[in-house]
Amino acid sequence: MTKDVTSLYLEDVDRGVFKKRPRSDSEEAEDGRAPNACLRVEKRQRTLFDMHFPRAQGKGDAKSSSAYELKQSCDSPKVSVDVNASALRLDQSALASGPLKLNAIPFSLSAYQESLSEKERSLLQLECETMGKSWLKVLKDEIKRPYFIALKEFLWKEGVRGIGDIPSMLRVYPPAKDIYSWSNATPLGKVKVVILGQDPYHGKGQAHGLCFSVHGGVAIPASLRNIYTEIKSEYPAFNIPSHGNLLAWANNGVLLLNSCLTVCEGEANSHANKGWEQFTDCILSMVDKYGGANLPSGVFVGGPSGFGRGVVFMAWGAYASKRVAKLDKKKHLILTSAHPSSFSANKGFLGNGHFKTANQWLAKRYGVESRVDWCSLH
């Protein structure tokens, strides 16, 4: 059985704050990750975007160990030092010196699970097992709130209980193991762009936890075909793929988030007003606070690394536009238009220029390396 230590969860540990022995290759492999995966530097390849933006040198992302105790609310989650002392030594002086950077927030999964009641431990097992740890550590108090527990009780009655669920026996999509796949594909500190959906596709085999995306081999939905058409108009060299899997975007910093994370087969919006909207509102507030915290500084000097310095929100349709209406338009780039569905794509989605506009903004704020390669979906 793997020992539970306060682990390196992707970009989540700032070594300036925490002192922890390096993990061996065998320990990394035991976690299901390749040794030194976080330090691997891939060779830069020329993309379509090099034709549009000149390559520029960006400043390094300086580390800092300043931290502070956050208030207990969704916008400022309570930070409880619930780590095993033998696994981690926290620099106590940092706690009094200012706001906690994303990388400095301590989290121990085993200690968190031990703090839960028996009922909470049962209902929140799926979150503990499948939610990306960069998200779980800032949402751990939120998922204990009464509304979320009520949501989990509702899903339990619907048959959604854990990663061992047999999808073919359920009428709820996506499968339990995929409900939080967005959180694993796109760590909080690496978010560059947020694309908002409403609820998952409600056809069998379609939804897999990323909005607008479907597994390979599944027919491409009409909305996604229109998204591809728009990208083709902005980047003519884009080869429209024969599949609808957008995981490559998610891995490149695009948070593909639905407002409701589950749906009943054949019934659009069937899980609306059950609690998911409140939860995903909290997710958006975390993006506002920490989204892009670990992106390079580039030429932008609007705030220190370790905190959210602005991301791109793509809100298509009236529903999504309302979700982002209260966000700071000076901090973020908020792009709104008609929805890409077959009913409204010609009413303002096609021709909106969002994908190129997003990259221009990202290049100016974080440097050209932070642009999204919308054209690579293979």
Image: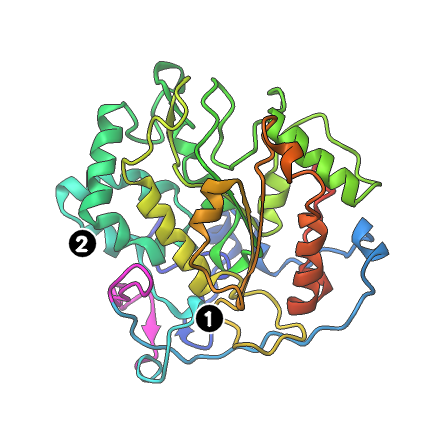
Q: Position of residue 113 (x, y in %)?
A: 23, 50
Which residue occupies the extreme front position in the image?
347
Residue 32 visible here: no
Residue drawn at 47 percent across, 70 percent down: 307
Question: Which quadrant holds residue 162?
Answer: top left
| Quadrant holding the C terminus | top right
Q: Nearer the viewer, residue 213 or 277?
A: 277
Question: Which quadrant holds residue 131?
Answer: top left
Q: Amino acid at mark 2?
A: Ser
Compared to residue 150, the image places residue 164 above or below, namely above
Residue 4 left/right relative to 199: left
Residue 29 left/right relative to 155: right
Residue 115 left/right relative to 138: left
Q: Residues within 10 Å of mark 2 (few under 14, many from 20)?
A: few
Q: Nearer the viewer, residue 129 or 50?
A: 50
Whole-number angstrom distance, CA of label 1 to CA of label 2: 25 Å
On residue 257, the disc is none
Q: Position of residue 339 (x, y in %)?
A: 57, 37
Q: Which residues are magenta?
A: 72-92
Residue drawn at 69 percent across, 68 percent down: 364
Q: Position of residue 261 (x, y in %)?
A: 39, 36
Does the segment drawn in magenta span residue 89? yes
Give the labeled residue for mark 1.
14
On residue 115, the disc is 2
Numbered circles on residues, count: 2
Helix, strand or loop for disc 1: loop
Q: Position of residue 263 (x, y in %)?
A: 38, 27
Q: Amino acid at mark 1?
A: Asp
Helix, strand or loop for disc 2: helix
